[in-house]
Amino acid sequence: MVERGEVDAARVMPHSAHRSRYHAVLGLIGRRLLFAVPVFGVVSFGVFLLAAASPFDPLDQYYGVRMNRASEADLARAREQLGTDDSVFVQFGRWVGGVFTGDLGVSRSFRQPVTEVLAERLPWTVLLCAVGLVLAIALAVTLGVLAAWRQGGWADRLITATGHALEGIPPFVLALLSIAVFSLALGWLPVAGLTDAGAGLSAGQVARHLALPALVLGISQAPWLVLHLRQSMLSSLADEHVTGARARGLGERLVVLRHALPTALLPLITLIGVRVPELVTGAVLVEEVFSWPGAAAAVVQAALAVDFPLLAALTLLAAGTTLLGSLFADVTTALLDPRVATDG
Amino acid sequence: MADLVGAWHSAARSRAGTPRGRHIGGRARLRGLLGVGGLLVLIAAAVLLPSLGELDQSKVNYGTRLLAPSTAHPFGTDANGADLLLRSFAGLRVSLLVAALCAAISTVLGSLFGAISGALGGWPDRLLMRLVDTVNAVPHLLLGIVIVALFRGNLWAVVASIALTHWTTVARIVRAEVLSLRERPFIDAAISGGSSRARILRRHLLPAIVGQAAISAVLLLPHAVWHETALSFLGLGLPPHLASIGNILTEARRAVLLGSWWVVVFPSVLLVLTTLATSGLAAGWRDRLVPRRRSELAL
């Protein structure tokens, strides 16, 4: 991803170098966007090839149980309309043409256009992921700093051991256990859904229903961030500028939070960008368990119903999010860290 | 200055293959030993236990439905009245078998891909690595879900779903290894001796990466278990007669609403123990075999 350039700490960057750096970052963005085009092409064509090789008849989904009653002529007409007898290339070309005109086809399992399904569900996924990510980062910063600051102490051991153990627990197990404890045994929070049955859509309702899924998503994403931040805090606490700050007699809090933490946060930003696929995966599992009406849960519904148009759109969406995540990581690192080369 | 000496020391130590400090090395070794021991116990239990008791997963016995853990049923019983201890270990056996198969396939696939890419070099290498980037651009579980959805109800679809998404890590590791091997004198000697590219790949490069590939396979195991369990949990994985832990946990979703915590807790604990034991074993083995690559290989 990021090529580390020659590190020359003593060199002071002239003003013009800053400007050319922004140009270089813009160039990086441009190259990445250019690379995204073949990625989208290959991914969507790959998905189409899979669909063509699949033994599943798209008409099954279209007709459902009525398939048995439909006459041969009806089936032939439906095939004609849906274009299922055309070659993969023709179908793919038609789909790509649709994408450029904003028409992603009709979702067969939701019985509405794919764009509508996405518009309805995507905001809820973004909300869940954003809250989960903020929780994970908050956990990582507090616990990671605490563990590194008191390296070898009981807090460090507890945090590191819990982190390693949590790495092995899949998000859906965490979700089931949290439902068992917080919803059923203690009765604090609702089991699933976006609002209580029959209740209107209000901020309070959504917040109560969001708490548990966001907490599970955040905690399932946190271990990597915590352990990573602990590691980079340890190395930054041993840095010369931190020793210098200590030598000048600055207070412990100032040294740790203002001198050691900023340098340790840089790799965390990269990690967050690179871990977007795991966040998406976690969202799929968490939304499914909590019946959260987001786009990630729609993946499972689309897969169970072999709803190809929706599945293809969601796959491309996930690929786009992943690429954006890695672009975000590289751009922020390049902007924040002058030592990083931008020609990667 | 002290920093410089410290850095030199650890570099020299890792070149010599001795671990950094007794404390860290000892802990890693303990983790590895615990991993080996735990995994052996789990495998033995998964192989032996289900054949000891009578387990018919197709039968429903309402008389013993959702019984709490007792001496007769240490893990309790599930919603169909089957003993959960037997079912969990039978599920673990299925999970481990599928995971081992998938890890083996994706290791072979990834090793070949990485070795060919690294050995060719130049633009074919760049093209092949872009392909790896492209596969990685889709979250693995999502790609797996697409594959399984389009070939539903087929055991091989589950295997393909895992194997076809996990080879990229192996390919990257093996390619890096081949790129560094290419610069070694024995390859130069083989080239001067008149060996063809194919012969160098077959006789010199592939044997040299077997160790790395084996470690990757073990490192892939917990990922494969995780992936299979997630697919089965979503109802897209293994068929009910081959129930894995994922299937058991799906059924547990309804049972837990009735207040039967044990249906979730025991299979989950088994799953987590397996994951931890496998990754402990893999980490310990890796540190033993290639101490200088500790950080690079972290999957």
Image (cartoon, coloured by chain):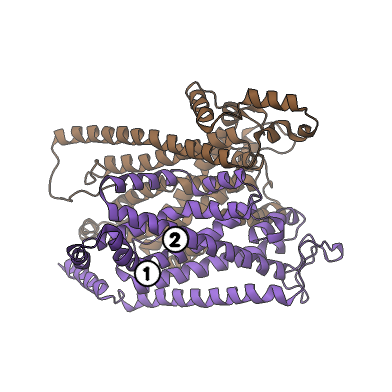
Chain colours: A brown, B purple
> How much space separates mark 2 and mark 1, taking CA atoms?
12 Å
In the displayed structure, would residue A120 be above or below residue B2?
A: above
Q: In this rendering, does residue A166 appear at all?
A: no
Disc with the residue nearer the chain's start (2 vs 1)? 2
Indicate the position of residue B270 as horizontal and vertical percent values.
Answer: 61, 67
Within the image, what quadrant is residue A192 found in? Answer: top right
Q: On the rendered structure, is B232 left or right of B186?
A: right
Quadrant position of the C terminus of chain A in the picture = top left
Q: Residue under mark 2: which chain is it in?
A: B
The residue under the point 30% across, 35% down is A31
Secondary element at tag 1: helix
The residue under the point 57% across, 39% down is A51
Is B166 in front, or is A238? Answer: B166
- At label 2, the amino acid type is Thr
Q: Which residue is mark 2?
A: B107
Indicate the position of residue B220 as horizontal and vertical percent values.
Answer: 47, 61
Q: On the rendered structure, is A120 left or right of A59?
A: left
Q: How many marks?
A: 2
Q: Which residue is mark 1?
A: B211
> Looking at the image, which residue sits at the far top?
A101
The residue under the point 32% across, 68% down is B208
Asked if badge 2 and badge 1 are on a common chain, one would say: yes
User: Label 2 crowding class (10 Å Cα cut-off): few <14, some 14-19, many 20+?
Assistant: many
Is A53 in front, or is B103? Answer: A53
- At label 1, the amino acid type is Gly
In the displayed structure, would residue A261 be above or below residue A198?
A: below
